[in-house]
Image (cartoon, rainbow, N blue to C red):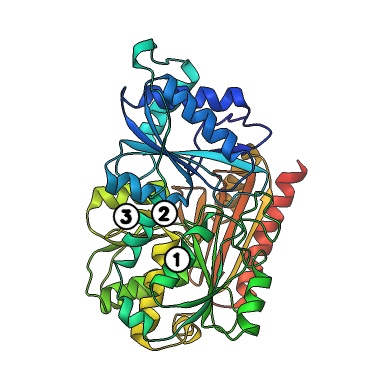
Amino acid sequence: MFKHGLFGTDGVRGLITELTPEFVVRLGEAIATFFPPGSRLLVGRDVRAGGEAYARMVSGTLLYFGIKVYDAGLTPTPALQYAVKTLGFDGGVVVTASHNPREYNGIKVIGPDGIELDRDREKELEEIFWEGRFRSIDWKAISHSVEPYGIVNQVYVDGVVEKVDRELIASRNFRILIDPANSVGALTTPEIAKRLGVEYVVLNGSLDPRFPSRNPEPTPDNISETAQVVKSLKLTFGVAHDGDADRSIFIDNLGRVQSGDRTATLLAKYLKTERGEQGRVYTAVSSSMVIEDVMKSIGVEVVWLKVGSVDIAHAMKKGGDALCGFEENGGFMYPPHQYVRDGGMTLALYLEMLARFKATPSELYDSLPHYYSIKTKYKMGRDKALLVVERVKEEFKTERLITIDGVKVIGRDYWVLVRPSGTEPLLRVMLEARSESEAKSIFERIDKIVKEVGSE
């Protein structure tokens, strides 16, 4: 367990059966040692199994080490992050495994800026954890109780709503579907829609740690029934979240599930051309080249980074020149609000964009350049996944290669990314091509390599 490091792409995650009380308490000791004595930390969780137990273990451990703990209860990750940043907390802890399957849980550690710890600070916390360099205890400094802090979700909703034109949105009489995946997005996204004068239907809105209706990740397969409902009810569009509501995947009025990078391309263009906002677009190598195609036409530079919202968020903050940031999985980051992925803020901006353009979602998506895409994953340990990456480098050695995260091969009319997952024992493969036949041809070459490595 955690052979290759404590933190993955975003936070500490594992199977619930592996995240034992001993492990969670030890992590709580490391967190308590990392933050100075007397720090004020906000603790919250999504609806996942084990979440309440983990939150109590972490909170109790923090109290023991003299940290002042405030309990946000059930809350989306971006809501807690917004509260940490705007209400002056020294940091936060979120118990969540985000989009991972039902049987996973995890812990994210948030800095005072509302962003997950950067890689250097993650390494520092990891060293405390592995070496057991925990702070010594003074019984007189132990904190006495966890303070309830139930205003987090309302503060967050207020922050989202004030960033967009409510009157414009309300004037369009939108009817939308919200799918919060039986988790904490149900506590905030419907309220955002209501405050913006939008009529909505909620699907999978009960809070249930078993995720009975669908897996938390809003992939086309997982939200196919959601898409059918959008189409059958003739709604303006649908929006589907992951387990902690920091992602938003949109379903257009024709019932088509749209990838996060195509939505982000529309939003980035809207921010520049209609709202007059300036800056560069920050995204990961897993994103479609469509963003570069469209941004070039309006004079916006695209900054390519390794996969991981943590890296994108900190790169944007450091650069100080971000128009927006995003991942292809539906995580969109709007710096005037906060530097992190935020499903509720993404929905609000999307509504304003539709209201401004007076267009249907399908019309906007169809205005973008079209690529044939294939996205899949293979169950595979990290060592073999890295071997696949090396074989792909050799297979495509005459093409342009980007190796900051796995390998991204860029050909004349296609690109393909092969990389190990940072959160699960998976190899992820994403590709796009100008023609369907070329997409299938490239995929067959990759699939052959995967099967060869898997049989060795």
Q: Which residue is mark 2?
A: 153
Q: Quadrant of residue 364?
A: bottom left
Which mark is nearer the camera, 2 or 3? Answer: 2
Q: Secondary structure at mark 1?
A: helix
Looking at the picture, tell me which residue is in the foreground, 177 or 427: 177
- Locate the C terminus by quadrant: top right
Residue 413 rendering spot, x and y as whole percentages? 50, 72
Q: Which residue is mark 1?
A: 191
Instruction: Tell me which amino acid carries mark 1.
Output: Glu
Return the disc, 3 or 1, that comes first in the chain's sequence.
1
Residue located at (56% from left, 45% from top): 97
Relative to 139, 238 lies left or right: right
Vertical comparison of 313 with 399: above or below: above
Residue 119 rendering spot, x and y as whole percentages? 39, 37
Mark 2 crowd level (few <14, some 14–19, many ≥20, 10 Å Cα): many
Q: Which residue is mark 3?
A: 338
Residue located at (41% from left, 33% from top): 122
Cα separation, mark 2 vs mark 3, equals 15 Å
